[in-house]
Image: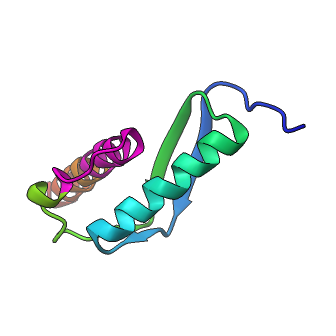
Amino acid sequence: MLKRPEPNSKIEMIGCQLKSIEAVKTLAKHLDAIEKTIGICEVEIKFSNGFICPDISEQEMATLQTPMEKIMKGVILSYRESVSKNKELSKG
C-alpha cells in the first residue's frame, strides 16, 4: 500500500517547457492522475529554469476547466509575474 505523502508535498518542475495550451492541459491531466493515484492532499508546484511560452494567451487559459487545469493557470500566471519582477530588478 502506498503511503500518503505529508501535507505540503512539493513537485518541482526543473527545465519544464510548456510550449502550448495543449501541453498545459496534458500536464494537468497527468498531475491529476498522480494526485488520484498517490493521494496528494496539499502540494506546492514550482517551476524553475523552465519555459512557459509567452504566446499562451489569457483567452486560451480561459479554456482551462478542470480543477488541476485551473491550478496550472495560477502557477503559470505566478511564474510569469516572478519572471517579470526578476527582469525589472536586473534592469535597476
Q: Main secondary structure of the magenta part?
A: helix
- Name above or below for residue 56 compared with residue 83: below
Any magenta on residue 67?
Answer: yes
Q: Residue at x 53, y 47 (%)?
A: 32
- Name above or below for residue 70 compared with residue 89: above
Q: Residue at x 65, y 24 (%)?
A: 7
* Quadrant of residue 60 within the rendered picture: bottom left
Find the magenta span and give its range: 61-78
Q: Residue at x 16, y 50 (%)?
A: 62
In the rendered view, does 39 fall on the left or right side of 1?
A: left
Farthest-out residue, top: 7
The x, y position of residue 23, in whole percent, is 38, 69
In the rendered view, does 53 fall on the left or right side of 10?
A: left
Q: How many marks?
A: 0
The x, y position of residue 35, in whole percent, is 60, 41
The x, y position of residue 59, in whole percent, is 9, 57
The x, y position of residue 76, in whole percent, is 30, 52
Looking at the rendered image, the quarter that the N terminus falls into is top right
Any magenta on residue 84?
Answer: no
Residue 58 visible from this viewpoint: yes
Residue 48 visible from this viewpoint: no
In the rendered view, does 51 fall on the left or right side of 57?
A: right
Farthest-out residue, right: 1
Farthest-out residue, left: 59
In the rendered view, does 50 fall on the left or right side of 83?
A: right
Q: Residue at x 13, y 62 (%)?
A: 57
Looking at the rendered image, the quarter that the C terminus falls into is bottom left
- Name above or below for residue 53 compared with residue 45: below
Viewer-side residue, 31 vs 76: 31
